C-alpha cells in the first residue's frame, strides 16, 4: 500500500514536471476555463504515459516546490467530468493528502491517472479547445499534437521506483496515528483497525439530538495511505461503524428566518476487504427542501440588495451583518427552488465575501461544496 504523503515527496524530489507528473498551485473545475485546462492535462498525461500511473500534485508552488496547500476537495464525481468530455477516458482519482505543517483545513491534492493504453481525446468543445483535439506532454507543457503510434515507454522504471519507495510500513502507520490523536485533543479523537491492517482515525465534536449522535468539525483519515477521507468545518455528520465498514452521512443545515433543519446530503461507505483492498462508494441522498415562493422572493431581493451594498463598499448595519452570514445558503435555497439567476448571484458574491472576512467566506465555500455535489448528480 502506497503512503501518498511519501509519494508526493518523491514526486517533488524528481527533477521537474514531465510526461508522467505535473504540479499546480491550484485548479478550479467550477469555471469553464479551469475545467478545460484540467481536462487538457489529464488527456496529455494519459497519452504521454500510456503504461504507467501519472500524477498531478495540487497545492505546490511551481518555482520552488514549496507546499502551500489547497482546500479539501471531496467531489467523488470528478470521474463523471472525465467521462463526459474525453474519448477513451482514463480512470482518475482525486485524493486529499494532509501535511503536518499545513493548517488543518488545508491539504495537498493528488490526482492519479490510471494507464489505459488507448488514445484519449476531447469529445466536445470546451473553452478554447475543440472536440477531437489530442494532447501530449512536451516537457512540462501539455499541448495539442498529431498522434504518433510509436510512443516510447521511458517511464516504467522511474515510476516503479518512485512508487516502491513510497510504500507504507508499520513505523509510518504508528507515527500517523500518534500524530492524529495528538493534534486533535479535545474533539473526541478515536481510531479503529479494520481487517487487522487498515487504520482509520476520526475526530469531531459530539452532539446528541433526539437520541441521535452527530459530529461537527469532522476529520477522517485513512492512516495507511495518509489520505484524508472527509473534512468539514461546519456541516454535521453521523458515523456508523461495523466490523468491515465505516459509513458517513453528511448533513446540511438549511432554512431561513430561524427555521432550520438538517437534511442528509451524501452517504459514503468505505468497505474493507480481506485482500488488503478497500472500496469507497458514495451516493447522493439529498432531497432539496421546497419553501414558499412568495417568502423566497422577499429573501432573494433582500440578498440582492445586500450584495449590491457590499459591492459599493457601504457599511452594513448590525442586522445586515447577521443577514450576511445567511447570504450563501439563501442563494442556494433559491437556486434549488428554481430561481435560476440565484446561481449567478452566488458566484458573483465570491469576490466581495472573500474580501469581507474568513467567517462568511467559509460559509460560501461550504455552500459551493453542496452545490457542486448536486450539480454533478
Image (tube, rainbow, N blue to C red):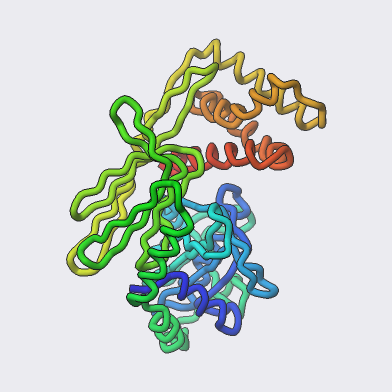
* Residue at image point 71% right, 24% down: 306
**Relative depth, front residue between 218 and 253:** 218
Does residue 341 show up?
A: no
Total label count? 0
* Residue at image point 58% right, 37% down: 363
Position of residue 202 measured from the top left corner of the image (x, y, whole percent)? 37, 52
Position of residue 81 measured from the top left corner of the image (x, y, whole percent)? 46, 52
Does residue 369 show up?
A: yes
**Relative depth, front residue between 187 and 28:** 187
* Residue at image point 39% right, 51% down: 189
216 on left or right of 299: left
**Relative depth, front residue between 280 and 31:** 280
182 on left or right of 26: left
**Is 352 located above or below residue 37 in the figure?**
above
**Is 109 located above or below residue 363 in the figure?**
below
192 on left or right of 49: left
Quadrant, the N terminus? bottom left
Position of residue 3 measured from the top left corner of the image (x, y, whole percent)? 40, 72
Amino acid at each position: 500500500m502506497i503512503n501518498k504523503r511519501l509519494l508526493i515527496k518523491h514526486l517533488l524530489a524528481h527533477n521537474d514536471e514531465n510526461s508522467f507528473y505535473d504540479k499546480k498551485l491550484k485548479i478550479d473545475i467550477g469555471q469553464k476555463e479551469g475545467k478545460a485546462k484540467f481536462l487538457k492535462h489529464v488527456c496529455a498525461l494519459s497519452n504521454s504515459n500510456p503504461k504507467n500511473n501519472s500524477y498531478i500534485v495540487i497545492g505546490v508552488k511551481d518555482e520552488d516546490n514549496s507546499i502551500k496547500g489547497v482546500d479539501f476537495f471531496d467531489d467523488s464525481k470528478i470521474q463523471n467530468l472525465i467521462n463526459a468530455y474525453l474519448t477513451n477516458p482514463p480512470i482518475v482519482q482525486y485524493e486529499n493528502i494532509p501535511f503536518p505543517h499545513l493548517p488543518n483545513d488545508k491539504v495537498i491534492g493528488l490526482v492519479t491517472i490510471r494507464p489505459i493504453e488507448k488514445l484519449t481525446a476531447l469529445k466536445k468543445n470546451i473553452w478554447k479547445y475543440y472536440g477531437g483535439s489530442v494532447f501530449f506532454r512536451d516537457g512540462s507543457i501539455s499541448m495539442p499534437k498529431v498522434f504518433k503510434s510509436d510512443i516510447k515507454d521511458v517511464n516504467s522504471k522511474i515510476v516503479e521506483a518512485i512508487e516502491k519507495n513510497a510504500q507504507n510500513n508499520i513505523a509510518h502507520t504508528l507515527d500517523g496515528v500518534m500524530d492524529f490523536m495528538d493534534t486533535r485533543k479535545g474533539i473526541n479523537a478515536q481510531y479503529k483497525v479494520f481487517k487487522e491492517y487498515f487504520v482509520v482515525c476520526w475526530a469531531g465534536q459530539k452532539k446528541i439530538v433526539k437520541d441521535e449522535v452527530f459530529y461537527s468539525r469532522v476529520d477522517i483519515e485513512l492512516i495507511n495511505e495518509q489520505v484524508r477521507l472527509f473534512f468539514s468545518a461546519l456541516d454535521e455528520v453521523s458515523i456508523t461503524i461495523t466490523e468491515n465498514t465505516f459509513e458517513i452521512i453528511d448533513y446540511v443545515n438549511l432554512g431561513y428566518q430561524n427555521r432550520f433543519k438538517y437534511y442528509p446530503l451524501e452517504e459514503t461507505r468505505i468497505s474493507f476487504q480481506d485482500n488488503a483492498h478497500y472500496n469507497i462508494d458514495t451516493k447522493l441522498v439529498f432531497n432539496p427542501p421546497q419553501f414558499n415562493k412568495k417568502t423566497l422572493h422577499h429573501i432573494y431581493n433582500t440578498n440582492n440588495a445586500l450584495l449590491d451594498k457590499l459591492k459599493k463598499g457601504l457599511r452594513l448595519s448590525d442586522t445586515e451583518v447577521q443577514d450576511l452570514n445567511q447570504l450563501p445558503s439563501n442563494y442556494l435555497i433559491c437556486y434549488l427552488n428554481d430561481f435560476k439567476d440565484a446561481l449567478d448571484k452566488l458566484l458573483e458574491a465570491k469576490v466581495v465575501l472573500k474580501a469581507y472576512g474568513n467567517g462568511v467566506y467559509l460559509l460560501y465555500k461550504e455552500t459551493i461544496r453542496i452545490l457542486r455535489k448536486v450539480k454533478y448528480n
